Amino acid sequence: MANHYLDWNATAPLASAARAAWLAAYDQSWANPGSVHAPGQRARHSVDQAKASCARLLGCKSHELVVTSGGTEANALAIHSATFGQSLAADAVLMSAIEHSSVQRNGETVSAVRLPVDVCGRLAADTVRAAASPTTRLLCVQFANNEIGVCQDVPALVAAVRAVAPQARVLLDCAQGAGKAPLNLAALDVDFASIAGHKFGAPKGIGLLYVKNGIRIAPLLFGGKQQQDRRSGTEDVAGLTALQAALESALAHGEEESIRQRMLLESAFARIALVLPKVQWLAHAAQRLPNTLSIAHPGVINGALVMRLDLAGVSVSTGSACMAARGEPSHVIAALGIDLSLAKSVIRVSIGPDTVAEDLDAFVNAYISEVKAMTAGN
Ligand SMILES: Cc1ncc(COP(=O)(O)O)c(C=O)c1O
């Protein structure tokens, strides 16, 4: 049976450009980029080139990028750096209630305050202004949410926190934004931004942390002082080279691809709604990623539905892949304040540049027939 992979927010398949770049880097730039000999310098050159190109694509400077193992490490490094060695007031760290667990759990170590969002997952600038004070040191927000795709109004949130706490840092978790939407980090005026390569076709285990020029990093790892002692450990030359290639190829798809993805999901949802009028698209009214459909239907249990769809050859998820095993609504869905029976039915469909209309046709048919079967007699 054909498989229809509709879980791109969990991870994207390796992009062909990334694969080619990864293999070429392993052939030609396999040496340690810290070595002074010629092969080492070749590897160093590859690192420098990849970083410079990523910086151009992300709207920042090359020296503002720290290579990490992915989004989780980037978020941890930013939160640690913004809070390390400081006496922290109760409102020192603020974050939206729908942050990824890598932000939430690192935030817990510094007693972060979770700020409520509206029914679409939007954090209001007024909420930030009301929660912040001159002792606020860090605000953590997402470019886009991994489960419902909602995009935050980043300039408004940055302005809101700085109006009250001019010295506050802002961490923008771009794990779901990079490669899916154009980003200009300097223009967004954030202090930190996290990038997860595997979300846009790079191999797993490679990412970036943007650190605005002049901001000091408090390292999490101590060792060979690579990357100006901001992140010790030999850089993953091939991984970084592949990340650069994946980012370039993802962004080359441009606005046309975003429109194509948006139309595929809109059409799929409309066809489902014709047959199942109680179906809902969470966060539909908000500014969203074009590739994400968070869909709910009362009377259905999402874990069971995901399994039934899987048996029909359609791979979707209940939300964050890291939390997929749990039966309760995720903290993201819970934060929306929707009815519990609807919350328990939410599944996430997320697509990418390889997704074709037939994949969505398979989803629409399977969703309709499984939801009908699960709600028969209700
Ligand atoms: C919004 C968000 N932040 C951070 C991460 C963590 O990234 P990684 O898997 O590279 O550690 C993810 C991954 O699901 C994510 O969706």
Image: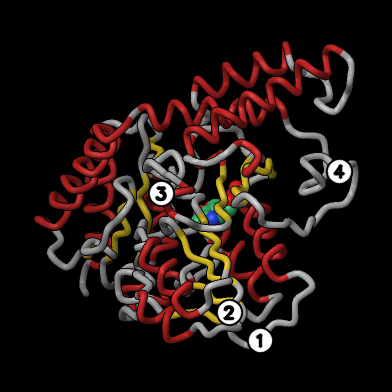
Q: Spatial distance from mark 1 to mark 4, Cα to Cα?
A: 32 Å
- Mark 1 or mark 4: name the one nearer the start of the chain: 1
- Comparing 95 with 137, the one in front is 137
Question: As displayed, is residue 299 above or below residue 46?
Answer: below
Amino acid at the residue labelled 1: Ala
Would residue 75 be seen by someone viewing this image from the given angle? yes
Q: List the residue tagged with mark 3.
A: 316
Viewer-closest of 260 and 320:
260
Give the labeled residue for mark 4. 225
Mark nearer the N terminus (3 vs 1): 1
The residue positioned 88% from the left and 51% from the top of the image is: 222
User: Could you tell me how far apart the alpha carbons at marks 3 and 1 are, in whole angstroms?
Assistant: 41 Å
For marks 3 and 4, the one nearer the N-term is: 4
Which label number is shown at residue 157?
none
Identified by mark 3, the residue type is Val
Which label belongs to residue 136?
A: 2
The reply to whether dot 2 and dot 1 touch (C-beta < 8 Å) is yes
Residue 212, image x and y in percent? Answer: 59, 52
**Residue 207: where, in percent of width, then height?**
62, 42
The residue mark sitting in front, 3 or 1, is: 1
Left or right of 246, for residue 233: right
Q: Depth check: 306 or 152 in front?
A: 152
Q: Earlier in the sequence, mark 2 or mark 1?
A: 1
